[in-house]
Image (tube, helix red, strand yellow):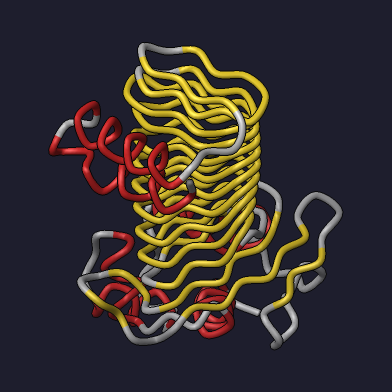
Amino acid sequence: MTLGEKLAMYRKQNNYTQEQLAELLGVSRQAVSKWESDIAYPETDKLIKLSDMYGCSLDYLIKDKQEEAQPASGISVRLTNIYYERRSARMVRGVPLWHINIGLGRSAHGIFALGLVARGVFSCGLFSLGVFSCGVLSLGLLAFGSIALGLVALGAIAVGVLALGGVAVGAMAIGGSAIGLVSAGGAAVAKYAAVGDHARAQVAIGITEAYGEFTHIGEYSVQEYSEIMDRIDAAVPAALRWAGNIVKWII
């Protein structure tokens, strides 16, 4: 196979159009067409980038040999690089609508992204970054993961404005161990209000232990409940009233 034939084969296997590939490489579509027709040859830096993108050796691209040719399914099997990659032909502001890229050292980038490392509006991966993010290590506005950081975070360890997890840290934290301005959990520590088995806060409501300016331990009467609600309203600032309402609902 010639260099042009290999470049055309890899481009089609990776679901790129000539326009998309040209945009990624910073060249014209006509340049890509000439490469694939063997009328012209890519510059060295472009060849290196193409070999990285396609997961093949530079030596294979340049030399006329067949042993590293990729199967039409888009699955590449090599001793040093096992991966699966597909992407949509449709682009949104230069980004694929969806991109699946699973393999060691590879990342997925698309509106919908799936990979060991994923970046997108909706992303899922071992390491995930997105508006809506799911992964072992997840960062996003809405994040789910073993370790989650986000505006709303849910995970074994969760850090966010609203955090829910085994260990939760946030403006509003709910978890086995919860630390925040307002918190609820087995062990709850907060600046303003805390409710849990062990609670520490300005207003602390505990089952077995409570420390704060106002505390209550164990069951409470209707009158005591009303006083607790008033205390929380007085302690929690207006900006965190939503968090205070969550604690009141839990109580």
Query: Which residue lies at the image location 51% right of the left edge and 61% below the top edge?
Result: 108
Say which quarter of the image contains residue 26: bottom left
Q: Is residue 45 visible?
A: no
Of 106 and 128, nearer the camera is: 128
Query: Which residue lies at the image location 54% right of the left edge and 54% below the top edge?
Result: 144
Query: Which residue lies at the image location 15% right of the left edge and 38% below the top edge?
Result: 239
Of 38 and 204, nearer the camera is: 204
Left or right of 35 in this view: 216: right
Say which quarter of the image contains residue 95: bottom left
Q: Position of residue 151 (x, y in %)?
A: 34, 46
Q: Is residue 194 visible?
A: yes
Of 71 and 164, nearer the camera is: 164
Q: Is residue 8 above or below residue 138?
A: below
Query: Which residue lies at the image location 37% right of the left edge and 79% below the top edge?
Result: 97
Q: Where is residue 35 in the image (x, y as percent from the top left)?
A: 39, 74
Q: In this view, does 166 lie above or below 84?
A: above
Query: Residue pushed farthest right?
Result: 79
Say which quarter of the image contains residue 228: top left
Figure label count = 0
Please state, as top left, top right, bottom left or bottom right, where the N terminus lies in the image. bottom right
Q: In this view, does 142 lie above or below 70?
A: above
Q: Where is residue 12 in the image (x, y as percent from the top left)?
A: 52, 85
Left or right of 175 in this view: 88: left
Left or right of 120 in this view: 174: right
Q: Is residue 176 above or below residue 27?
A: above
